[in-house]
Image: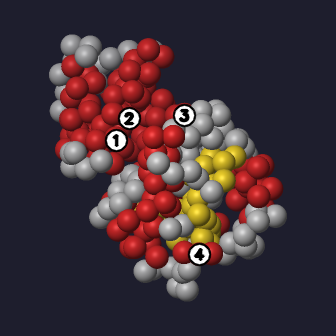
Amino acid sequence: MKKYEFLLFDADGTLLDYSACEARAISLTMRRFGLEPDSGKVAAYSQLNRRYWDMIDSREIACAEALERRFVEFFALYGVECSGREAEDFYRERLAEGGMLLDGAAGLIGALHGRYRMFIITNGVMRSQTRRLKNSGLWEFFERVFISEETGFQKPQPEFMDYAAARIPGFDPAAALIIGDSPTTDMALGHSCGIDTCFFDPEGRGFAPEAGFRPTYTVRSHAEIEGLLK
């Protein structure tokens, strides 16, 4: 296997358990605005939220507008009127409190620390992503964290990687590996920037052929990532 120096990790779905953080935050937000949460409503929000983030990633809608509009649309499904901004602010604070990790993530990062120069590259909002990573206990293991709101670009825009690369002393794309769970953001970013990729696919959903490219590696567990990098 090729020798790498720089490891660029996605956060949500790769290291952080976003589903658990999201379920907790939206359940508390529902109660705050008079709606009793249940698994069906949490699933409905998650699906709607994914649709809005897909639109953000494809630049169909501005991030700030999408983050507020999703709550207006969600609560309207259940006949509840609310301020999108108030709901977003409350939800953002609850989301920021959550630093739950995926099983195996802490062990992986601990095993790689000191052997590689490690960075986070994540789409998201600065205040929540920063606090969640600090709450997770992983923050100190990374040389720097790059968040889309800070960079002004969303993965997979090549400008996101340009921003990060310019701020990593001695960065060499030929010695870098992007590790993430999203074909359309993480893997597409690596493909467009000529950086090797490791597709984290714990559910074994595979890589859609219509993407027009393949990741350099595909793994189903954090242990497999560690095995690749030994």
In this rendering, which labeled residue sits more in front, label 1 or label 3? 1
Residue located 38% across and 65% down the image: 158
Label 2 or label 3, whichever lies nearer to me, is 2
Give the class, few, some or many, for how many residues have Cα within 10 Å of label 3's Cα (few <14, many ≥20). Answer: some
Q: Secondary structure at mark 2?
A: helix
In the picture of the structure, the residue carrying the numbered disc 1 is 53
Eye-nearest disc, 2 or 4: 4
Name the quadrant containing residue 90: top left
Name the quarter where the C terminus is drawn: bottom right
How far apart are the alpha carbons under marks 4 and 3? 35 Å
Amino acid type assigned to the residue bearing label 4 in the image: Ala
Q: Residues within 10 Å of mark 2 (few under 14, many from 20)?
A: few
Q: Nearer the viewer, residue 75 or 187?
A: 187
Q: Are marks 2 and 3 in contact (CB under 8 Å)?
A: no
Q: Residue at label 2?
A: 50
Query: Which element type, helix, strand or loop, lies under badge 4?
Result: helix
Distance Cα–Cα, label 1 vs label 4: 30 Å
Residue bearing the label numbered 3: 20
Q: Gap in Å between the C-alphas at discs 2 and 3?
A: 15 Å
Q: Is label 1 in a helix, a strand or a loop?
A: helix
Q: Amino acid at mark 2?
A: Arg
Question: Which residue: 35% across, 68% down?
Answer: 159
